[in-house]
Image: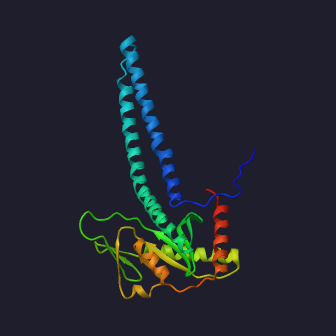
Amino acid sequence: MKSPIKDRPLRNPGQSLDWRILDVVMDRQIKYVTYGLAVCLALVFNWAYYFSRKPFPPVWFTLFGLLFLVYCYYKIRAATKEIEPLTQGRDGEKAVGQYLELLREQGVKVFHDIPGDNFNLDHVLVAPSGVYVIETKTYSKPDKGDARIIYTGDSLIYRNGFRDDKPLVQVKAAANWLKQIIKESTGKDFNVREVVLFPGWFIESTAESRKSDVWVLEPKGLPGFISNSRVRLSGGDLNLVAYHLSRFVRAAGVG
């Protein structure tokens, strides 16, 4: 007997982060929860034996067990803190991915979580106006005040004045990698537009940023930018890129 599914399914939004969360839960949390429960069980049996037969007082074993339980607690707590930003990032990717799915009605091909070498592309769109690589940044918003990011074209300025260009560098590297992958598989050179999305944040663009090749937007602004862009891909090229990209994702498997 064999499966009727010929090809692997395409990946879901945030799938890589789902796997990372599962790894942390299985390797860090569940392991130390199990250790802690084993120590508790041993303590219960040891004290029960002591009160029933009184061979020796289990004080030292209890002290050792309590110390080990404290150690397990801090390990579990550290794993929980590691999971929290991963969960937020995954939820952001899923929310943006579900929103991008609406673009299929406009003839846009949508791909999620494309695996690379020790990295992944959150989303890729293949539209009549071109190919878009999208990085989603799900940052926590301040409790008070505006959730505003100023985009200068070469950096991002956050509410506290902190400047950051890492998301821009990351999406440019992603675009270059994707452009090379598409060229190797199709034999054609297609331009890839870089996009960084910040769910829930207000993006204030400067005059310099409007000249940049990188779009920095709140997700709801992306469809308008795409629809206002001129057509760059013919129907044949659009389907060609989408076909080879889907084959690449399926061949990558679940790593």
Q: Quadrant of residue 95?
A: bottom left
The spot of residue 181 in percent (x, y) is 64, 73
Q: Residue furthest front?
A: 105
In the displayed structure, 205 sits above or below 71; it is below
Rendered location of residue 117, percent (x, y): 60, 65
Q: Position of residue 196 (x, y in %)?
A: 45, 73
The residue drawn where x is 63% and y is 58% is 9
Report the residue that reaches farthest toward the left: 144
- Residue 238, quarter of picture: bottom right
Q: Give the residue displayed 41% in from the left and 40% down from the top.
A: 72
For the point 54% across and 74% down, which residue is it? 106
Could you tell me which quadrant the C terminus lies in?
bottom right
Q: Quadrant of the N terminus?
A: top right
Residue 210 to residue 38: above or below: below
Looking at the picture, tell me which residue is in the foreground, 208 or 74: 208
How many marks are shown on the rendered structure?
A: 0
Q: Position of residue 223 (x, y in %)?
A: 46, 76
Tell me, what colour scheme is on the image? rainbow
**Which residue is located at x 32 percent, y 65 percent?**
141
In the picture as drawn, the residue positioned furthest to the top comes out as 53
